[in-house]
Image (cartoon, grey):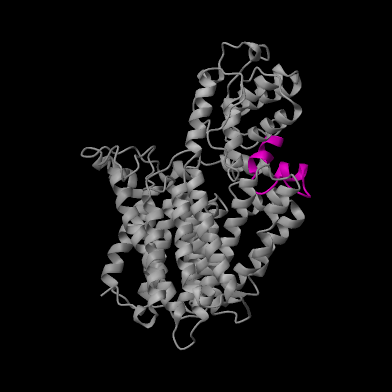
């Protein structure tokens, strides 16, 4: 059978925690609920909950932190320092960024500790088996949802997102995210094949996964496929794989064949199903140049502010600084390249140190991975990293935290140099995490009431300051967002209030924000800066307004731009 594993060797608390971790991660991937102001909040919450469940393994066991990992915990302090230095605009952004980095380091250390605990049991195999099962199950269900979306079988379902466009994305809302998840699932099948599990079942699952990867039309997976092919061939000199070079090349060719035949298949099936037209491989290969515009903007932004950067997770602020000189037509919440992002956030000196550190770790993994566990784990890490060079999957905990666990598995077979953490630290971490995640969930659910109050305030053109129904100290960015939406643009405001509005525009570079800020600036006598907002509006969204039109109160902001305000 496929599921003949070694879990009986684990203690009960290990089995329970690892099982609940897998179930939680599974639900985070299949979650169909995506709402403003933080569309992925529920998935992120469930993923962090899965990490907290895994943390309960260490209620009576010391956590081992590899010395190679300790710089990660120092990097986690950078956003906090930037906030207190006034570089990061909002406390919420700083703390969440630090939490993500810290959680990555903890996931890294937890997997390392589990794999190091008993040298008589090959725990790295058990951890890899569990992660691979999790990826495969999540991948199979997501693939089924993607096929349902592709064929147009379900509309307005509570459990499946409606398809917008012609690229299925299951419940992950982004086709490239689905492609990366399915790639992780496919690599999990490779791992089980190497461990001599049921070949027929694995082959059937692999065919489904490859077909659905092709359905996503992701260019990222083209690069990942080539990398896997090259890396696999290089490693055959050091490791005797069960899957021969010839067979893996056949699998690669089957993927290419499906990509080329997909438009024909769509044409045939469109007579029976409600299928949208699919782009050909030539159309996909010749599109996507908006990334080049974004990278050009980011390079100019780095030149403009090379030393200290623009603050963690504030790529939009960098774009805002150069958009009227280096034109682009897409709001960049990310540089679509993790290296550029880090340098934008931290500046060249710190940014290069951070990226150099992680490159050293990754290079160590590539060179020193010798077993099927470490080789496949390194391939999985590589799939996410290649994606992160073209987009921003590491912004999402359902990719970031599993990568941390995979890194721990690889490092456990490479290094035995670690620091033992006192047991009381584990309890502090568990208790703090439990109350922290509960507090964030409770407080986040109040934000919608604040946003409703803000919209009602704006709709009625109220000139008074908005009194938030629920002031939320932690979510200060969403507090300010609600106040900004409610702000009457024809108001005399202080320089501090104007600066707060400026920060909001540098966070949300939407037509609504640009036009409203232009009105506020014009009414307060800042003509040149108001004209700049109109220029940016013209460059990015091809919407033209004269400076004089900013004083016409009938052209209500709320009537012109009622979308994307949150």
- Position of 555 with respect to 252 (left or right) is right
The image shows residue 465 at horizontal and vertical percentages of 62, 25
Whether residue 244 is visible, yes or no, is no
In the rendered image, the vertical position of residue 397 relative to residue 272, given as above or below = below
Residue visible at 40% across and 54% down in the picture: 29
In the rendered image, the vertical position of residue 233 relative to residue 104, given as above or below = below
The outermost residue toward the bottom is 120
The image shows residue 323 at horizontal and vertical percentages of 67, 33
The image shows residue 453 at horizontal and vertical percentages of 51, 28
Residue visible at 25% across and 38% down in the picture: 270
| Viewer-nearest residue: 180 or 110 | 110
Residue visible at 30% across and 37% down in the picture: 156
The outermost residue toward the left is 272
In the rendered image, the vertical position of residue 449 relative to residue 102, given as above or below = above
Q: Give the extent of the magenta segment.
A: 299-322
Residue 211 drawn in magenta = no
Residue visible at 40% across and 80% down in the picture: 11
Whether residue 95 is visible, yes or no, is yes
| Viewer-nearest residue: 9 or 443 | 443
Residue 315 drawn in magenta = yes
């Amino acid at each position: 059978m496929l599921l003949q594993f070694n879990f009986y060797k684990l203690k009960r608390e290990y089995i329970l925690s690892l099982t609940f971790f897998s179930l939680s991660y599974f639900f985070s991937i299949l979650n169909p609920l995506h709402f403003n102001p933080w569309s992925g909040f529920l998935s992120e919450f469930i993923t962090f909950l899965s990490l907290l469940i895994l943390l309960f393994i260490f209620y009576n066991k010391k956590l081992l932190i590899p010395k190679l990992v300790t710089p990660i915990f120092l990097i986690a302090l950078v956003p906090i320092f930037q906030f207190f230095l006034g570089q990061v605009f909002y406390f919420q952004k700083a703390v969440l960024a630090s939490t993500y980095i810290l959680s990555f380091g903890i996931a890294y250390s937890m997997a390392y500790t589990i794999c190091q605990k008993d040298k008589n049991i090959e725990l790295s195999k058990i951890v890899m088996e569990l992660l691979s099962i999790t990826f495969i199950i999540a991948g199979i269900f997501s693939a089924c949802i993607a096929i349902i979306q592709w064929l147009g079988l379900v509309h307005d379902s509570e459990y499946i997102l409606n398809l917008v466009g012609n690229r299925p994305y299951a419940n992950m809302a982004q086709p490239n995210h689905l492609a990366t998840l399915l790639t992780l699932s496919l690599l999990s099948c490779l791992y089980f094949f190497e461990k001599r599990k049921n070949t027929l079942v694995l082959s059937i699952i692999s065919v489904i996964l490859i077909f659905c990867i092709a359905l996503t039309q992701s260019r990222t997976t083209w690069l990942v496929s080539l990398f896997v092919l090259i890396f696999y061939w290089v490693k055959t000199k050091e490791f005797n794989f069960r899957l021969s070079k010839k067979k893996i090349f056949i699998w690669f060719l089957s993927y290419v064949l499906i990509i080329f035949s997909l438009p024909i298949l769509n044409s045939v099936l469109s007579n029976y199903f409600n299928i949208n037209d699919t782009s050909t491989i030539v159309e996909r290969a010749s599109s996507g140049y908006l990334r080049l515009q974004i990278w050009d903007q980011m390079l100019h932004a780095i030149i403009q502010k090379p030393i200290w950067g623009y603050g963690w997770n504030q790529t939009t602020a960098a774009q805002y600084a150069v958009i009227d000189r280096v034109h682009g037509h897409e709001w960049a919440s990310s540089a679509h390249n993790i290296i550029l992002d880090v340098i934008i956030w931290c500046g060249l000196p710190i940014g290069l140190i951070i990226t150099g550190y992680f490159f050293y770790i990754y290079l160590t993994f590539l060179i020193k991975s010798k077993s099927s566990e470490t080789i496949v784990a390194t391939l999985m890490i590589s799939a996410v990293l290649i994606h992160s060079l073209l987009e921003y999957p590491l912004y999402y905990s359902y990719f970031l935290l599993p990568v941390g666990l995979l890194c721990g598995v690889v490092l456990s077979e490479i290094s035995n140099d670690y620091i033992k953490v006192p047991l009381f630290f584990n309890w502090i971490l568990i208790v703090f995490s439990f109350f922290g995640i509960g507090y964030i969930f409770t407080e986040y659910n109040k934000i919608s009431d604040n946003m409703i109050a803000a919209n009602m305030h704006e709709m009625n053109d109220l000139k008074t300051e908005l009194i938030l129904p629920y002031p939320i100290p932690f979510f200060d960015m969403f507090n300010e967002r609600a106040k900004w939406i409610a702000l009457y643009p024809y108001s005399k405001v202080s320089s501090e209030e104007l600066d707060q509005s400026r920060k909001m525009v540098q966070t949300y570079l939407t037509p609504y924000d640009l036009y409203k800020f232009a009105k506020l600036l014009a009414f307060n006598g800042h003509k040149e800066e108001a004209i700049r907002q109109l220029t940016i509006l013209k460059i990015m969204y091809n919407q033209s307004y004269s400076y004089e039109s900013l004083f016409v109160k009938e052209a209500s902001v709320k009537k012109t731009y009622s979308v994307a305000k949150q």
